[in-house]
Image (cartoon, rainbow, N blue to C red):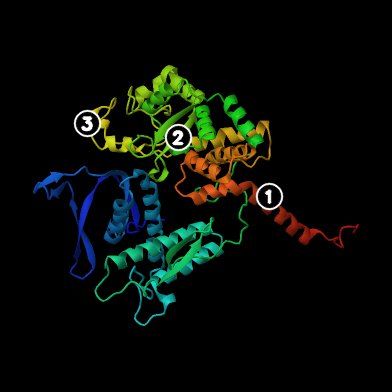
Amino acid sequence: MPVDMTRSKIVYIQRLYRLDGALALSAEGIPTINWTNRTLHWNIDKDKFEETSDLMIERFPIIYRNCEPWDLGNLYLYRWWLNFAESSPRSIVTIDRKAKNLLSYLHFIEEHKTDDLPLDIFYAPPRSRKNQRVTYLYKSYLTRLFEQKQNTLQTVKQKAAEVAAFYMFLNDNKLTPPGEEIEDRFYTLKKNTVIVKGGRKFPVNYSDIHITKATVEETQFDLIQGEEGGVRPLSEKEVEWVLEGVEALSNRQMQLIVWLALYTGARKQTICTLSVEAIQKAYKSSRTAKEARIPVGPMTGVDTKGNVQYVLKVPSSLVAQVYDWVKYSEIYKERKEKSYYGDSSRNYVFLTKFGRPFYTANRHTYDAADPTYSMTLKRSERGQAGLQLGSSINDFVNQKLIPWIRQHKDAQYKGFKFHDLRATRGMRFVRQAKVLGMLDTEIITHVKGLLGHKHESTTMIYLRYDELVQLQKEKNKKVHEAMYGEAFPWDNFNV
């Protein structure tokens, strides 16, 4: 089959610096963007131009449509990056997903466009009904994909929400052809109030393009939904299996990473961006104490989700184990020689066999933006931080640790996510604190600080987790008895 060269696609820019875009109109009156490089800014106090510390991002997705960059879509992505990514280069994952969602929309338009149906992003025939306009046609298409089991509910919801956000952006910035309105033509805005666990109310704006159909699948009731993606605290038996498994697999580095997750509650992002300097300071300050305290978050060199700043509490004996790893391990010595930072206290505590981080730190991204900076790389190789987000750790859990547990402990074991270790730390503390008679208010305060929660409503779920799970089990048991508690006529039927 011949390749359609005009089909929309994504091209990745290896390194993109902050730009400015000025709105202009083509001869046909279509909005276009004139891009300019933003390397200077006007200092009012000094009455002169000064260089900016330009933000840089690697592998920025540029959408090409009809063999040319798609101005409106790329502007939408770029403005999102400027608004939300200043403090978190990690947003490249989100922006890549957003670009792919918009690309799916363009592919829908291209595949369904005919002479009788000249689809475009502004297709809305005069006096047409909603279901005849391009955005609503796309919503119907996504709904069919879900009903036909070609896409999951989460996928179609995400794609519809992206298109809605794109048109809201066009509306807010008046990026429309002459005489074309966006709101109430390509979407209608709705308002609602949602109540989250803990009783707090939040206003929510959404559009009638959003797919709000609730899933018919039964929600797994033993998840803590306040954490991203939902997490499941492991039982004590599972904890034993995990500890025994990482010992048996003889991967010292992964063992330390698992220990840190299980005994501190730190996220993968925080553990894998720990610096040698942070461990050295923690080790020296805690040799006579049971607990070491490591500041994490902005300005510390150790990253946290949402740039939450808190103090990571680590058993001092575990800090000593990590310290010995970076100081005496021949494996670590070999890996740091290949790494970006080399023999520097700014280096990562944990490195792959290629000398790369498991999770790219913010400090690394900013340092890489300066092409003169690197402890080990040749000048021609500098300037790239790469983008690692912990997938190697997931691979270890899914491809080695869980299979080991199934082989040696329970062949039917359903498994766990690395992030579940964080929830396990929180729940182990809550259970022990209750046994010791701590007040609920004290427990909430300590768990919130222990796990670095941004919102107390998430911490509240930990406090009542065991109670809620037990209640749900009892409800499920009653439902099962109500449905299947009778004697069926075929029970004693013999052929």
Mark 2 / mark 3, whichever is N-terminal: 2
| Residue at the (43%, 38%) spot, across then down | 269
Quarter of image, res 384: top left
- The front one of 56 and 273 is 273
| Residue at the (46%, 50%) spot, across then down | 455
The residue type indicated by label 1 comes to Gln
Labels 2 and 3 touching (C-beta < 8 A): no
Q: Where is residue 391 in the image (x, y as percent from the top left)?
A: 46, 38
Tell me the SS state at disc 3.
Answer: loop
Tell me the SS state at disc 1.
Answer: helix
Mark 2 vs mark 3, CA separation in Å = 33 Å
Pointer 1: what residue?
470
Q: Position of residue 470 (x, y in %)?
A: 68, 49
Quarter of image, res 362: top left
Mark drawn on residue 372: 3
Q: In the shown orientation, is residue 338 left or right of residue 490?
A: left
For residue 361, say whether it is visible: yes
Mark 1 / mark 3, whichever is N-terminal: 3
Pointer 2: what residue?
312
